[in-house]
Image: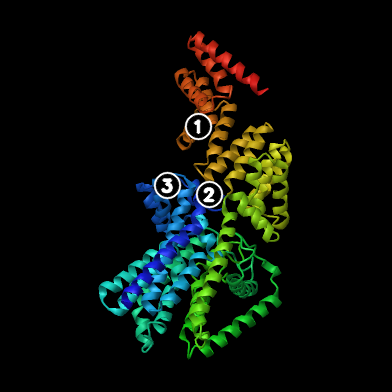
C-alpha cells in the first residue's frame, strides 16, 4: 500500500512539474525574435532557415560561426525552421519544452540518486520557475543552454545507471551523452568534475579517489578537446577579449563580484536583464574584497560542516565550479555577468537549500507542515517573479527598454533600440540613442554605422559619411559600413570611389546583397553594363523577390535592348510592389519598343495614377 502511494506521489510530482512549468512559460508562444543574436542564429542565417540540407548539415559540423562550435544547436534550429519556418512562437515553445524535459530529468536523477522524493522535487521546482532561468528559455538564441542541459542531465542519469550496474555498454552511454552535450554547448566541460562530486555524495563512492579519476579519463579527454576547440574558435572570431583591454586584476575583481551577485540574485531576483555592461577599469576593489570575504567565509563554513552534511560541499562546489568557464577570467564578450550562465550552476545552491532546510528543521514537531508551507510560499513568489520577468522578453523593444531601466550606461541596449525606433519613424530618437551609445563606447563601429544611416535619412550626407569612415577605422572588414560609404560617395557623384568601396565590401562578404545591388547601379551609371548585370544576377539569386533589384535588372537588360528580359523583370517588380509607379513607367517604355502600344498606354496611365497618389 505504501509503495503504491509513493508511486502516486511520484506521478503527481512529474505532472505538477510539467504543468506548472508549461503554464508559466506558455506566454513565450506569442513572443517575437529579438535583434541580438537571433539574427545570427536563425532569422538571417541562410544555413539555418533552409532547414535540413546537405550543405547546411556540413556547415553545422565544420563552421565556427557565431564564435562557437556547437553543431547540435545548429541542427536543432534547422529542425525548427524545417517544421515551422520563421514562426517565432514555435521556436520559443521548443525552448520551453526542452526546459520542461530538463526539469523532469533533474527530478528523476536526484530521486534515483538520493531516494529523497520531496527534496528532489524542491530542486527541480526551483530550477523550473526561478526568474534567473527566464533568459535561457525565452531567448531563442539560448537554445544551446536548454539543449545542452538536457544532455547534462542525461549524462548524469546514464552515470547513475553505470554506477549501480557497471558495464562497458553503460559507460559508453555516459560518453555518448556527454559528447552530444558538448556539441550543443561547451559549458559542459565541468561535468566530469560534477560526477566526481556525486561520487562523494550522494553515491558514496569516494573510497578510492584514484580509481574514480582514472575511470573518468575518457570524459576528461573529451573535455580538453572541447575546451581547446572552443578557445580557438572564439579567439579566431575575435570574441576573446585581450588582457590589455580588460586586465587580469579587473577580471578577477569582476569574477568575485559576479559570484556574489549570482547568489544575491538567486535569493532576490530583481533587476534581471539581457545585458550587464562590463565595468572594465571601474570595478570597485572594495566590492571585490567584500565579495571575496563573503565567498571565503561561506567556503570555510561549508567545509567545516561538510564532515556531517556532505551535500553542503557538493552543492557549493557545484555552484562555484560550473561557473568557472563563464565567470570572466577568460573574457568572452562584453558582459560582466549573465542570467543565462546560472542555468546549471544554481542547481548546486538548490541542493544546499533543499537538504539543508530539512536538516535545519529536523527537531521541530511540525517540520513537514512548515517545509510544505515554506515551499509553497517560495514557489508562488518565484512563479510571480518569473511571469513578470517573462513579459520583458516579448520583442526587441521590450527587452532592451527594460535593460535601460535597470542598468546604467548600457550601450548595447541603446544600440539595439535604434532599429525599432527607425521602423517607427522616430529618426531623431534613433540618432540620440546612437549618440548616447557612442558617448559610452566612442569606438563602437555598429553605432557609428547606424548613426550614419539615420543622418543620411534626414539628408546630412557629409556627416553620415564621416561616421561610416569612423566605423571602418575601427573595423575595416565591416561590409555594411563599406557599402553605406559607397552609397554616400555615389550620391556625391563620386561614382568611381563608390565602385571601389562596393568592391571592397564584396571582398569581405561576396553575398552582401546591398553591395551587389548598389554596386550594380554604380556600374550601370558608368555604362559598364555587363559588369552591372553580373552583380544584379548574383543579387537576384540571394533575394529574388526584392523590388529594387528586379527594377535594376530590367533597366540593365533594357540598355542592351533585351526587351523580353526587361519586361519580365519589370513585371515581376510590379507584382512585388504593385503600388509603386516606377516599374509601370519602365514597362510602358519596353512595350512601346516592342510595338505593344495598347499595353504601353495602359502602363503609362497606371504609372501616372500611382504617381498622383504619392504626391
Quadrant housing the C terminus? top right
Q: Residues within 10 Å of mark 2 (few under 14, many from 20)?
A: many
The x, y position of residue 340, in whole percent, is 53, 64
Label 2 close to label 3 by CB (< 8 Å): no
Q: Nearer the viewer, mark 1 or mark 2?
A: 2
The image quarter containing residue 150 is bottom left
The residue lying at 65 percent from left, 23 percent from top is: 614
Q: Which residue is mark 3?
A: 81
In the image, taking residue 198 as reference, residue 459 lies left or right, namely right
Q: Secondary structure at mark 2?
A: loop
Q: Nearer the viewer, mark 1 or mark 3?
A: 3
Label 1 close to label 2 by CB (< 8 Å): no
Q: Which residue is mark 2?
A: 33
Q: Residues within 10 Å of mark 1 (few under 14, many from 20)?
A: many
The x, y position of residue 601, in whole percent, is 55, 10
Disc 2 from disc 3: Cα separation? 13 Å
Q: Residues within 10 Å of mark 3 (few under 14, many from 20)?
A: many
Q: Earlier in the sequence, mark 1 or mark 3?
A: 3
Q: Which residue is mark 1?
A: 536
Q: Earlier in the sequence, mark 1 or mark 2?
A: 2
Q: Secondary structure at mark 3?
A: helix
The x, y position of residue 66, in whole percent, is 50, 55
The image quarter containing residue 300 is bottom right
Amino acid at each position: 500500500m505504501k509503495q503504491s502511494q509513493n508511486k502516486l506521489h511520484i506521478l503527481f510530482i512529474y505532472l505538477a512539474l510539467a504543468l506548472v512549468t508549461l503554464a508559466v512559460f506558455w506566454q513565450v508562444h506569442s513572443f517575437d525574435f529579438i535583434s541580438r543574436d537571433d539574427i545570427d542564429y536563425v532569422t538571417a542565417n541562410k544555413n539555418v532557415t533552409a532547414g535540413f540540407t546537405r550543405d547546411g548539415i556540413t556547415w553545422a559540423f565544420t563552421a565556427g560561426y557565431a564564435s562557437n562550435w556547437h553543431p547540435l544547436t545548429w541542427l536543432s534550429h534547422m529542425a525548427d525552421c524545417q517544421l515551422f519556418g520563421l514562426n517565432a512562437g514555435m521556436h520559443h515553445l521548443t525552448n520551453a519544452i526542452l526546459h520542461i524535459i530538463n526539469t523532469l530529468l533533474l527530478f528523476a536523477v536526484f530521486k534515483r540518486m538520493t531516494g529523497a522524493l520531496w527534496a528532489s522535487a524542491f530542486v527541480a521546482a526551483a530550477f523550473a520557475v526561478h526568474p534567473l532561468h527566464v533568459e535561457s528559455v525565452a531567448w531563442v538564441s539560448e537554445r544551446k543552454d536548454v539543449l545542452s542541459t538536457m544532455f547534462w542531465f542525461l549524462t548524469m542519469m546514464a552515470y547513475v545507471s553505470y554506477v549501480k550496474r557497471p558495464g562497458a555498454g553503460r559507460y559508453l552511454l555516459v560518453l555518448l551523452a556527454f559528447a552530444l552535450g558538448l556539441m550543443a554547448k561547451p559549458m559542459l566541460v565541468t561535468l566530469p568534475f560534477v560526477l566526481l562530486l556525486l561520487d562523494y555524495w550522494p553515491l558514496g563512492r569516494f573510497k578510492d579517489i584514484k580509481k574514480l579519476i582514472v575511470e573518468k579519463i575518457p570524459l576528461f579527454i573529451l573535455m580538453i578537446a572541447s575546451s581547446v576547440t572552443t578557445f580557438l574558435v572564439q579567439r579566431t572570431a575575435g570574441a576573446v577579449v585581450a588582457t590589455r583591454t580588460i586586465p587580469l586584476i579587473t577580471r578577477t575583481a569582476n569574477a568575485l563580484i559576479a559570484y556574489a551577485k549570482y547568489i544575491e540574485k538567486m535569493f532576490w531576483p530583481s533587476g534581471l536583464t539581457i545585458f550587464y555592461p562590463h565595468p572594465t577599469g571601474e570595478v570597485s576593489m572594495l566590492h571585490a574584497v567584500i565579495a571575496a570575504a563573503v565567498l571565503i567565509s561561506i567556503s570555510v563554513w561549508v567545509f567545516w560542516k561538510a564532515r556531517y552534511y556532505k551535500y553542503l560541499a557538493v552543492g557549493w562546489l557545484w555552484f562555484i565550479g560550473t561557473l568557472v568557464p563563464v565567470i570572466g577570467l577568460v573574457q568572452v564578450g562584453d558582459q560582466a555577468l549573465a542570467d543565462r550562465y546560472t542555468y546549471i550552476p544554481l542547481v548546486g545552491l538548490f541542493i544546499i537549500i533543499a537538504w539543508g532546510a530539512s536538516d535545519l528543521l529536523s527537531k521541530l514537531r511540525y517540520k513537514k507542515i512548515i517545509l510544505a508551507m515554506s515551499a509553497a510560499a517560495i514557489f508562488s513568489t518565484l512563479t510571480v517573479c518569473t511571469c513578470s520577468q517573462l513579459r520583458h522578453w516579448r520583442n526587441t523593444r521590450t527587452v532592451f527598454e527594460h535593460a535601460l531601466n535597470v542598468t546604467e550606461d548600457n550601450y548595447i541596449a541603446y544600440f539595439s533600440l535604434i532599429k525599432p525606433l527607425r521602423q517607427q519613424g522616430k529618426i531623431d530618437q534613433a540618432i540620440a540613442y546612437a549618440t548616447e551609445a557612442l558617448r559610452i563606447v566612442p569606438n563602437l563601429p555598429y553605432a557609428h554605422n547606424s548613426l550614419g544611416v539615420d543622418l543620411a535619412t534626414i539628408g546630412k550626407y557629409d556627416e553620415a559619411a564621416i561616421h561610416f569612415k569612423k566605423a571602418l577605422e575601427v573595423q575595416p572588414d565591416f561590409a555594411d559600413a563599406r557599402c553605406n560609404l559607397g552609397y554616400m560617395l555615389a550620391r556625391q557623384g563620386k561614382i568611381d570611389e563608390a565602385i571601389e568601396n562596393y568592391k571592397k565590401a564584396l571582398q569581405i562578404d561576396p553575398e552582401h546583397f546591398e553591395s551587389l545591388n548598389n554596386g550594380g547601379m554604380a556600374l550601370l551609371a558608368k555604362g559598364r553594363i555587363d559588369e552591372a548585370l553580373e552583380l544584379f544576377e548574383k543579387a537576384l539569386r540571394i533575394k529574388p523577390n526584392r523590388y529594387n533589384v528586379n527594377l535594376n535588372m530590367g533597366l540593365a537588360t533594357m540598355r542592351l535592348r533585351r526587351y523580353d528580359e526587361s519586361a519580365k523583370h519589370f513585371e515581376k517588380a510590379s507584382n512585388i510592389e504593385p503600388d509603386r509607379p516606377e516599374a509601370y513607367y519602365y514597362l510602358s517604355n519596353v512595350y512601346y519598343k516592342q510595338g505593344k502600344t495598347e499595353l504601353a498606354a495602359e502602363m503609362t496611365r497606371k504609372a501616372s495614377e500611382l504617381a498622383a497618389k504619392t504626391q
